[in-house]
Amino acid sequence: MTAASAIQLAPTDNVATMVSAAEAGQAVTINSGDGRRQVCAAEQIPFGFKIAVADISTGEQVYKYGASIGQATAAIAVGTLVHVHNLAGLRAGGDTGRTG
């Protein structure tokens, strides 16, 4: 199985965006301005979704594009999918009613 890929846009980002889908247990090459490294996908992560590239504690800010995009609502381990089930966005809460 070849490695999947993701891109990390800022060195302070604790997530990267998948540029190819990953299966659970698959290596994911994280491409950034600092070079390349690999993490292991903890679960299936679709194309275009976020993967944690650092452990993120409950309540910690999640950074993408060098800016906070929200707050972790649960502990997020490296290689885990980061999405609405573990992230409260800073933008409108949609139909969930969450605002933070």
Image (tube, rainbow, N blue to C red):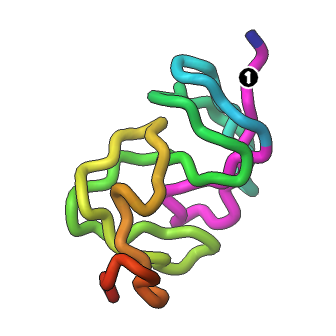
- Above/below status of 25 relative to 45: above
- Above/below status of 66 relative to 21: below
Crowding around mark 1 (Cα neighbors within 10 Å: few <14, some 14 to 19, many 20+) is some
Residue 1: image x %, image y %? Answer: 74, 10
Residue 94: image x %, image y %? Answer: 45, 83
Decide if residue 92 is on the left or right side of residue 39.
left
- Above/below status of 11 relative to 78: below
Decide if residue 7 is on the left or right side of residue 42.
right
Name the secondary structure under disc 1.
loop
Q: Is residue 99 magenta?
A: no
Decide if residue 99 is on the left or right side of residue 6.
left
Task: Name the residue: 66% across, 41% down.
Answer: 46
Q: Nearer the viewer, residue 19 or 84?
A: 84
Task: Name the residue: 49% across, 69% down.
Answer: 63
Image-quadrant location for residue 42: top left
Residue 4: image x %, image y %? Answer: 73, 30
Image-quadrant location for residue 28: top right
Q: Nearer the viewer, residue 6 or 31?
A: 6
Magenta stretch in the rendered image: 2-19
Quadrant location, the C terminus: bottom left
Q: Is residue 14 magenta?
A: yes
Question: How many numbered marks does the figure carry?
Answer: 1
- Identify the amino acid type marked 1: Ala
Task: Name the residue: 73% across, 22% down.
Answer: 3
Q: Which residue is mark 1?
A: 3
Residue farthest toward the top in the current orientation of the protein: 1
Task: Name the residue: 48% across, 45% down.
Answer: 81
Residue farthest toward the front in the current orientation of the protein: 95
